[in-house]
Image (tube, rainbow, N blue to C red):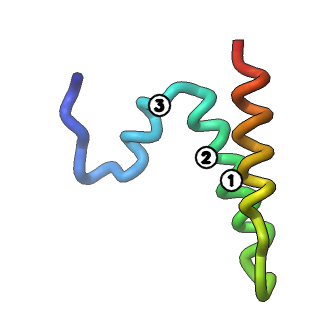
Amino acid sequence: MDPIDPHDPMEPLRREPSEVRNIIQRVLKLEAERLFQERPHINDDILRIIKETVNDSP
């Protein structure tokens, strides 16, 4: 395994499988959409994203 470059914070994410990157991208998008809500309840949505990604993987 190659060492992690401490100057590139995105480098560990590039190593992850596409399913993990997909989950992270979808969760970040969801958080950005709800950033200005007073009480953004996103736990159920995050769980749904994970389940969808896992079920869609080969």
Are the residues flagged by discs 3 and 1 in contact, CB closer than 8 Å? no
Q: Nearer the viewer, residue 15 or 48?
A: 48
- Give the amino acid at mark 2: Ile
Are the residues flagged by discs 2 and 1 in contact, CB closer than 8 Å? yes
- Give the amino acid at mark 3: Glu
Are the residues flagged by discs 3 and 2 in contact, CB closer than 8 Å? yes
Q: Which residue is mark 1?
A: 27
Under circle 3, the secondary element is: loop
Disc 3: CA contacts within 10 A as few (<14), some (14-19) or many (>=20): few
What mark, if any, has residue 42 been given in the picture? Answer: none
Under circle 2, the secondary element is: helix
Rendering coords of residue 46 (x, y %): 72, 52
Rendering coords of residue 35 (x, y %): 72, 76
Under circle 1, the secondary element is: helix
Q: Which residue is mark 2?
A: 24
For the N terminus, the image quarter is top left
